[in-house]
Amino acid sequence: MHRIFASESAAAPGDSHEQVVLCHDRDSGLKAVIAIHSTALGPALGGTRFHAYASEEEAVQDALNLARGMSYKNALAGLDLGGGKAVIIGDPTKVKTEALLRAYGRFVQSLGGRYVTACDVGTYVADMDVIARECDYVTGRSPEYGGAGDSSVLTAFGVFQAMRACAQRRWGAPTLAGRRVGVAGVGKVGHYLVEHLLEDGATVVVTDVNQAALDRVRTAHPGIEVAADAAALIRADLDVYAPCALGGALDDATVAALTASVVCGAANNQLAHPGVEKDLADRGVLYAPDYLVNAGGVIQVADEIEGFVFERAKAKAAKIFDTTLEIFARAEADGVPPAVAADRLAEKRMADIGRLRSILLPGDRRR
């Protein structure tokens, strides 16, 4: 069964969401939430997160937050796609099965293309191939099925481009050579980011709650520094702090303890609450908005919709460097934190392009 909630306003940016669907298939054990924030720019594209939430309410709130972030991310990346996100409730190492994934695929299919899914935390390319057996609206599939494969490749590449822009803004050169970068979370994206940083000449310090992820990085790069935990990493002597795990990494305590003068990482929803962006600015910390920084992955899976060409997608992701510098310039000109400048630019694009739907074409019907 599924329950559907729809808001009154279909395409407004901000905190309103168009639709929230609660999905439950008793036999497979599927419990999922699909949140559509905005389709002002097109179908809502966003990944599926598989996580052991403490409650359904926590899962719904995470889906809402992530879906809103996808609207802003897709808008700022210049994509003709809206924002949505889904979460599956449960420990993926214990409850993920073919039946559960295919049941989920049928719920996505039931939305008729309003929501297009992809990988996220706890889901992988192989999972998308299973979901696609019941659903037409799946990206991030394996190359064997014409897909783009692992989207974390270009996610990490985009984060690195944004970090280069931060270095340009802060130190006058687009390189991390000689800088000390702390990476919190070395899973799919964080691992690739570490490789980019080391190749660029940075000193990298890492931490992760997953010992296997740490072991993988240390095997690939013997001698890399490892902090005891996230709190120790934040207090370490750093030039750049890169949160690359779950959201909410930047709270009051973190900002107060932070030694880095730049924050630029792959995690979604890094600001624990409104006002943190101002606290960072007041401390002189240059913050690159998360949904700008980590857009490489969605650029990759969006390119798959057209028929994936890696070079084309990589060229689009490389533009994150320019967009990051533009956001910093707008923030300075307007006297606001970069997060506010990024929100304004994304909201303007959603409003300007979304307005075009009021111009009727032959065969159109007013909603």
Image (cartoon, grey):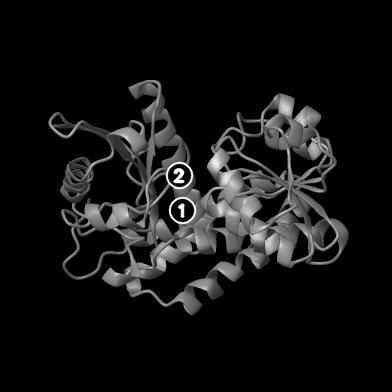
Give residue 259's position: percent from left, percent from top: 83, 38
Residue sitting nearer the eye, 49 or 35: 49
Q: Residue at x 78, y 52 (%)?
A: 332
Give residue 3's position: percent from left, percent from top: 19, 30
Residue 110 located left or right of residue 230: left
User: Secondary structure beneath disc 1?
Assistant: helix
Q: Are marks 1 and 2 in contact (CB under 8 Å)?
A: yes
Comparing marks 1 and 2, which lies closer to the viewer?
A: 2
Give residue 357's position: percent from left, percent from top: 33, 60
Dot 2 amino acid type: Pro
Dot 1 amino acid type: Ala
Q: Residue at x 78, y 67 (%)?
A: 174
Label 2 crowd (10 A; few <14 / some 14-19 / many >=20): many
Q: In this picture, is 271 found above or below 179?
A: above
Mark 1 to mark 2: distance in Å? Answer: 8 Å
User: Which comes sooner in the sequence, label 1 or label 2?
Assistant: 2
Q: In this picture, is 305 found above or below 87?
A: below
Query: Quadrant of residue 32 in the image?
Result: top left
Query: Quadrant of residue 213 in the image?
Result: top right
Residue 160 located left or right of residue 154: right
Q: Which mark is residue 13?
A: 2
Is any atom of residue 159 visible in this view? no
Q: In what quadrant of the picture does the N terminus appear?
A: top left
Q: In this picture, is 302 found above or below 216?
A: below
Is any atom of residue 218 visible in this view? yes
Residue sitting nearer the eye, 210 or 324: 210
Residue to which mark 1 is pinned: 351
User: Secondary structure beneath disc 2?
Assistant: loop
Q: Residue at x 60, y 69 (%)?
A: 319
Give residue 166's position: percent from left, percent from top: 75, 57
Q: In this picture, is 159 found above or below 237?
A: below
